[in-house]
Amino acid sequence: MLNTIEKLRQYRAKGQFDSGHEYVCNLAQSVQEDKQVAIEVAQLYLVQGHFIRALAACEKARVPLFDEGLDEYSSEVLNEDSVCLELIHAFVNISRHSKLYTALRKASIAHKLWLGQEVEQEVMKLNIPSMSPIEIQSKIGKIIKQRDGLGALPSELGKEHRSTVSESRILMEYWYYKIFTSCSEQGLTDEPQAETKKRASKRISDLYTYVVQNNRLREARYLLYHCVSLLEDNAKVPLMLGQFLECLEGTSFDVEKAQTHLDLAEWQIRYTFPASASTVEHQLQEAKRLFEKTDHTHGGLDVADLRLLLPRAYENLEELFRAKSENAAAYFSKSCYLKGLRCLLFAIPKAFEIGTLDNLVEQSIDLLHKIISHVGAELYTQLTFIDITSQSLLRAPEYGHALHSLESYIKSVPEEIGPRYHSYLYLSLRKVYSSLGNITEARECAKKALEISSCNRNSYIDQSDAALELATVEWDARVEHAPGSPEELRQIEKVIDLLQTWAEKDASHSYLYGERMKCHELGIIENYLFNFHHFEDAGNKAKQWFSRAQRGSQESGIPSYEDINGRVDELIAVRNFEEAIRLAKSGLEQWQSAPDPPRFHLAQGFFRVGTTLHLSAGHMITSGSVETSEDVLEYARILMEAMRYSYEALKAYRSTGGAKMTVTCTNHIWLAIQDIKQVSEDVGLKYLEAYLRELEITESFCDSIRRSLASTEKIRSLLVKRQLVSNDDQRKFYSLATQSCIQLMDPGSAWTWIQKGKARALSDLFGIRAFVPSSLLQAIHDDPVAHKLYQQEIKSTQSALHASPQAYIGATRKVMSDREAMKAVPVLAQLLAIREGAFDVSLETSFIQQSLNLSNIGGQKLKYVDWYFLPKSEGSTEAIAIFVRDLSGNTSIRQLTVTVSDVQEWIRKVFEPPEGAEPELKRKAGNRTLWELNGLLDGVDEYTDEGDLLVLSPCGILNSVPLHGLKVGGRVLIDRNLIIYSSSAAIFRQCQARAAASAHISTSPSGIKEAHSRNDFLAVYEESSSLAAEERTSIFTSVKNIAESFRGNIKLGQEVTKTAFMETCRDASWLFYHGHAIYDKQELLESGLVLSDHNLTISDIFDGAAMQNSPHVTVIACDSGTQQIAPGDEPLGVVPALLFAGATSVLGCIWPIESWAGRIFSEKFHAHLAAQMTNGNNEGGSHTVVNLAAALRDAVREMMDKKSVETRLPYFWASFVLHGCWFHASP
């Protein structure tokens, strides 16, 4: 056995891991089961970094000693080899399976039985049936003797020590402290981490002294290495290393000499270079010589890797990353996994600011995952995962990837994950939620992180930092309340209390950095209260907090250029702009002169200067300092300088790979341009023209953020995207782009920007089920380059869908890379545009003319009518503009006399009547009331002709107004024109494409497909009153009559279950429903249709309905067409849910209706459809194409006719609206 053990030690010492593994595999099973052999084998694999093999080696020989639930203990619990092996097994399991708590528990038991002061009491508690009391007492005596002997170890070299202790006994303590310090780093121990390391260092140092004194130099080397890594006083390191080299003189321990030379060189490079330059070179050369002499596998590589610490060893971080990547690959090629993992893990840039190295970084991350999987290192998986998600937190286009990855990983996090990593995960998720505008989830994650970090019993810093994160979220949450409201002030007071509490805790714990950060935030908050709420004492409080923060910076030794913001904020608060500008510029200069400064920090520096200059210019105006022509020139100069710095900031933000501040900075530049316009209109307009080009670049950035949020056939995907597009900066961006085009007198571009900002979350999801013309798919197939890229993207997409949480970000980066390459190929660019839900917003005639021909409508007859709220200078929306655009791109714009306030007041009057009062539109004067808003159609008579097909796309609260019921040129709009509604141009195009496909019309004649059509008519009316029973009979009779005319399937009453409805959705090409609907503003997702057994909610439709035959759907029910419109004009309701599910069009009601009025409408609507079918428009081949908009118009005409006494008031006829496509192919 001794020969075997010695060979294993030689393989380990020389890094000959492959040879060592081959040797182990050839050992007899009985030899591998020997505990001393198993200890050496496990340590061989631990040094190699192959945790799967290390664990297997332990399992072959170990006897479970300290497992939970043991009633009886083996006698091996008193065997030092067995206990040593058990501790190694526990340590391996920390890296292998993150078994931190288990390892700490086992180490604590071992300490009690072998190392503690109450060994006898602890051993006697155990039930060891295989040993007699006398044997146990004898063993206890030996253990205590060894313990006491080791406890009396001399603390200095040269002192005599005659006690003989086995290596297993030394290793027992060594691995105990390895476990304890590892658990301490993760926050599992009670004492502070520094105290744990100090205690461990002292004990390992004593053990080192003992083995050196006994000339056991091989053991001394690993003890010394561990001791040095624990030392708080770095000054002791060279002395200890030097003394050990002296001990090695004249011995054959050449590997140990080489490693010690290398350690000395590293210390000298870090702490005494360049004074020690010649000594460092000597150490490196000597180490290299000795490694070569011993034929060490990776010693030369160790020397080369250490040289990268030398000043000027590399030009920039990119060169360093390349070198570290090459070294890691070399380590892996020699099966030296542990050093390769560390080399690569710490080389991958956290900020992802690596210029042209994107591909190499991705390859490195992929390699890292493969190696970690190969060697089985869960702890490294966690560390790698945190680092990679940290990259994504700094790259806004990857927010969605980080969200998916973190949410998935946290759900399946290892049971024994340490509180430090666990809290980091929640803090990372907090940052993603905050960036996506989800304050509620961000708050919960911050609270969870604080709760978990409180379990980190030895690190106050983690708790304090988590508290700051929670305060940040609570501060962000103030925007949920109206500015100046009592609710906002209570929220701010809550944040102040939280920050003050923890600032004082930081002071008592001497955590200067934490105290400084909290004081700085308190200064910002008090400054906000002073400037925006005019609290008189807030200004002085702000100064006090800023002053305390600055003192904290000086005491903690923070470099001045890292603390610029706080001092600049303080100067701005007291209106000392001259000094604030000087200081901001000084900070930027210091960042610029720093070695290889992070680009994000440079961007922040430029932006800090730009915003400070802009504030200074604004102060000149508000303080009345611009009086003379010289003052005007100075004002203009400052603005121009602010523009230059802000533009430099924008370029720097873009260069970081996707900082969220890109949007904020773009918006800020617009404000500066507006101020320049006040000085010189011509100069301002020239800047505005150039600014439009920057807008296009930033817009693609906004798209990438939104699309990083996975589009899935689930409602949650839509909700997350809705939160993102409602972000203030993003909404402001699209608004500023539109305003820029209006100022440049370019209504066509303004309209396009409106469409780019409308309902983008919903249109993204529509792309999942978007119709792709067969001609386009054929073109891709016929192009070898396009086809290869297309197949490659499909493969990478599937890989991403099935990737683990840890690998998901890397997999999605591969997908994004493939899609970026696809954009360079025209046919693939078209495909991407369709799939991403943004295709053809410009409504080119060539894409839609064939659809128009189906219903005999000329291309010049389709017009898009859009409304836009014009922001006032102070930020509130008041004026309204109307846009009208035709298919050739001609766009007209007019500012309306009706204001947003007028509409708001009208809505309150009409839809919020006093309790018990009759609805306004139901009264005799209902028409006059409706037509009070005729001004919303000003210009429509000028820009459109009678009979035109108008696609109405209202914004915001206009979605509540029956625009089709207003008058234009003396006629009700729906009487004058064919009307359909759509949330955006992109959604309209997708609905039109579906309808065209269902009519056997594609953008190419080759787009013919077989059709399977079915008409379904459903009615359920389950009220129990006698009047309800009468109405139910009338409904069922009406539905039967309509269905008979259309050869439809009928389900009535109890037959209309939730399951039946979903099955009908799947197969129908025409779907009609008459019944009840629920619209709950508070629980919108629970709104939906009332069926016989359960309600069919909006969530149900999004998550479960899949309409395979592109049907038209009519829903005659109260509020079935009502939609909640979120910021960004994002609709949510039954209509968008059904359109997403696959309908080409949906006809619903935008307020509660009388059931009998719904019956009348349904009968008239279907009668006009039947008449069209009789006339036999058969442009669709085997289908008759019906014009839904025409049938709707004709039905409403009859209902609002003066002769129709029952239905002539707008309450009865104006509620019916058609969304989606204007035609449908009916069999």
Image (cartoon, grey):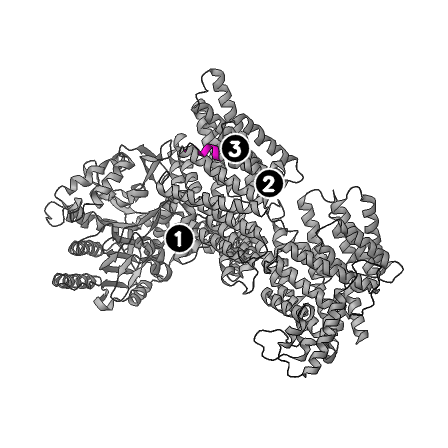
The quarter of the displayed image where residue 332 is located? bottom right
User: Nearer the N terminus, badge 1 or badge 2?
Assistant: 2
Quadrant in which the C terminus is drawn = bottom left
Q: Is residue 539 rendered magenta in the image? A: yes
- Report the disc number at residue 719: 1
- Looking at the picture, how far across and down is residue 320, in whole percent? 69, 47
Q: Which residues are magenta?
A: 535-541
In contact (CB < 8 Å): disc 1 and disc 2:
no
Residue visible at 33% across and 53% down in the picture = 1136
Secondary element at image label 1: helix
- Check if residue 625 falls in the magenta segment: no
The residues bearing labels 1 and 2 have C-alpha atoms spaced at a distance of 33 Å
What residue does disc 3 label?
A: 570
The picture places residue 194, in percent across and down from the top left corner, at 65, 54
> Element type at marker 3?
helix
The location of residue 843, given as percent across then percent down, is: 37, 44
Q: Secondary structure at mark 2?
A: helix
Say what amino acid the circle numbered 2 marks.
Arg
Question: CA separation, marks 3 and 2?
Answer: 25 Å
- Please identify the quarter of the rendering in which residue 364 is found: bottom right
Q: Residue at x 52, y 27 (%)?
A: 577
For the residue marked with disc 3, what is the amino acid?
Glu
Q: Label 2: which residue?
A: 599
> Is 500 located above or below residue 627 in the figure?
below
Circles 3 and 2: CB distance less than 8 Å?
Answer: no
What's the amino acid at mark 1? Leu
Query: Local crowd at mark 1 within 10 Å, few (<14), some, or many (≥20)?
Result: some
- Closer to the chain start, of discs 3 and 2, is 3
